[in-house]
């Protein structure tokens, strides 16, 4: 529909035209959303993988207080002299 045709419609016809345009555009919105999710899902999975890898590497390379701190919260802080923070 051209602009001049749209302007010649009465308010009810304009509203109906807008509603039908919206309803017909809904499948396109789902496609766009699906593309967005697919594009960002890969980044999310790799981000979670990096976080888990960093967590495991901190455990492996940490000293004994760090490893015990994974089981008892704050133990590493207490042993390193940060008593208030550890408690």
Image: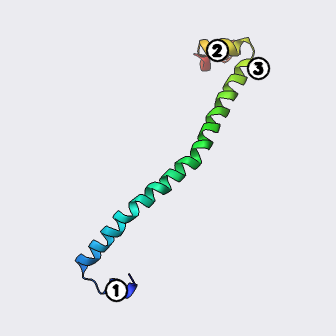
Residue at 48% across / 53% down in the picture?
33
In primary-sequence order, the first of circles 1 and 3 is 1
Q: How many other residues sit within 10 Å of disc 3, few (<14), some (14-19) or many (≥20)?
A: few
Quadrant into which the N terminus falls = bottom left
* x and y, in percent, of residue 81 in the image: 69, 15
| Circle 2 or circle 3, nearest the eye | 3
> Tag on residue 30?
none
| Circle 1 or circle 3, nearest the eye | 1
**Which is nearer the eye, 65 or 9?**
9
Q: How many other residues sit within 10 Å of disc 1, few (<14), some (14-19) or many (≥20)?
A: few
Residue 73, picture quadrant = top right
Residue 3, compared with residue 43, is above or below; it is below
Residue at 31% across / 74% down in the picture?
17
Q: Secondary structure at mark 2?
A: helix
Q: Secondary structure at mark 1?
A: helix
Disc 1 + disc 3, Cβ < 8 Å: no
Residue 3, compared with residue 71, is above or below; it is below
| Circle 2 or circle 1, nearest the eye | 1
Report the residue marked by disc 3.
61
Report the residue marked by disc 1.
5
* x and y, in percent, of residue 80 in the image: 71, 15
In primary-sequence order, the first of circles 2 and 3 is 3
Residue at 64% across / 28% down in the picture?
52
**Left or right of 55 in this view: 11:** left
Residue 72, picture quadrant = top right
Report the residue marked by disc 2.
69
Residue 58, compared with residue 17, is above or below; it is above
Disc 2 + disc 3, Cβ < 8 Å: no
Q: Compute the Cα span from label 2 to label 1.
A: 72 Å
**Left or right of 65 in this view: 37:** left
In primary-sequence order, the first of circles 2 and 1 is 1
């Amino acid at each position: 529909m051209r602009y001049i045709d749209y302007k010649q419609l009465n308010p009810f016809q304009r509203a109906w035209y807008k509603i039908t345009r919206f309803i017909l555009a809904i499948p396109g919105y789902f496609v766009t959303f699906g593309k967005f999710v697919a594009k960002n899902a890969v980044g999310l999975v790799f981000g979670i993988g990096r976080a888990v890898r960093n967590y495991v590497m901190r455990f492996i390379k940490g000293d004994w207080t760090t490893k015990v701190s994974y089981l008892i919260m704050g133990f590493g802080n207490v042993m390193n002299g940060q008593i208030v923070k550890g408690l």
